[in-house]
Amino acid sequence: MAFSFFKKNDNKPAAHVNEKYYHLKVREVIRETSDAVSLVFDTPSKPMVYQSGQFLTLIMQVNGEKIRRAYSLCSSSFVDEFPAVTVKKVEGGKMSTWINDTVKAGDVIEVMEPMGHFTTTYKAEQARTIVLLGGGSGITPLMSITKSVLDQEPNSKVVLIYANRNLESVIFRTTLEEMQQTFGNRLRVVHILDVPPVNWSGASGIPTVDLLSKLVSQEVNEVSKAEYFICGPQGMMDNAENALLGLSIPKEKIRKESFTSTSDKKPVDVVSPSAASGLEVKVIYDGDEHVFTVPSGKTILETALGLDIDLPYSCQSGLCTACRGKCLSGEVHLDESEGLSQSEINEGYVLTCVGHPKSPGVVIEIG
Ligand code: FES
């Protein structure tokens, strides 16, 4: 998957080189479909630990503009020697178009550390059924999870229900066929094609609630005991979640990785009238203390970036947690908190990309 937000102020120079970032050399570019490639990176010079389901944020200069965007890892650290991401070209997508058309082996790309909570813990003694519902490039983290489950849990099974426009647009089609041969009945792949070829005997049409509900009921033995992971376009994800809820799957067994924020909330002016011109915040990051005034209605991150303060971020929509910090004092209002767990919220974590100071004396430490 890829988050679909670009940083607005990215054409400004970074305040300093961020030592936390990686510089990964592209080892190989694999053409997966006519509009999707996988970038396989050489082993990083400093150790990079990642979990299946996580993503990398790539930072690139595209036509003179510095852009960052998050792409899920398709590789599994248990199975693959090298980390890899898959990038599908999206209409009007500067970074995805650039990567599909221009990036070649030998190029070096600046990359933030792996992030994301769309993960699970693997235990060899577990015997579970993992049901993955994916659409389009949403297969990317699901592929990584599939590899890890099959490799790490010999008694577990994977059911992948995968929706695409047509056969040609199915990312990892050949790899999935090979994996089915290798793993037999431990891996079941069910394709849904919107425009199927002649003589197609599989599922077809758009992945509606009814269709997904029917397929899950057909393919999964004990529906209530399985664990579910959903990643794809928002409409497909909503249908998948509703299908599962309709089958009485408890919400806590349904994991989702969103492409975009579902929130239509606009940033709220949370500043009191007496502080209408803004409130001062202190952000501690990478050994530096940055003190600046956040104007009413602006987020902490966008204010910092406007001042050339190099804070970490990726999606800028409250989903990826790349900008997460702990609020040590004062109060912060979040326009969106989908990316944070309840325990993180209880511990005082905030997201600077959707955060506004709500009181004087806000101090945030990004660690
Ligand atoms: S940048 Fe992704 S949650 Fe803030």
Image (cartoon, rainbow, N blue to C red):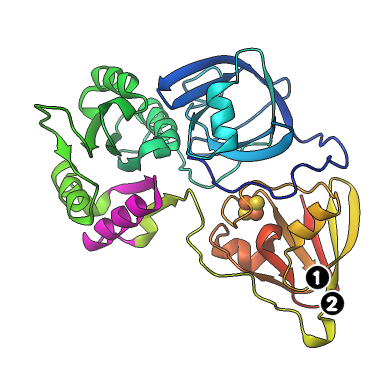
| 106 vs 115: above or below | above
Residue at horizontal 85 percent and vertical 35 percent from the top = 17
Q: Nearer the viewer, residue 263 or 175?
A: 263
Q: What amino acid is at disc 2?
A: Ser
Look at 29% across and 35% down and name the residue there.
158
Earlier in the chain: of badge 1 and badge 2, it is: 2
Q: Which residues are magenta?
A: 226-250
Q: Nearer the viewer, residue 350 or 122?
A: 350
Judging depth in this view, the residue of 280 and 198 nearest the camera is 198
Tell me the kind of residue under disc 1.
Answer: Pro
What x and y, as percent, mark residue 147? 40, 27
Give the number of the disc on residue 170.
none
**Horizontal and vertical percent position of residue 3:** 54, 45
Mark 2, ligand 1, within 8 Å: the answer is: no
Crowd tier of the residue under label 1, counting other residues whose Cα lies within 10 Å: few below 14, some 14–19, many 20 or above: some
Q: Kindly indicate whether the residue at mark 2 contacts the one at mark 1 (C-beta within 8 angstroms).
A: yes
- Disc number placed over residue 295 in the picture, else none: 1
Asked whether, in this view, residue 29 is left or right of residue 288, the answer is: left
In screen coordinates, is 86 left or right of 103?
left
Instruction: Say which residue label 2 marks.
Output: 277
Q: Is residue 243 magenta?
A: yes
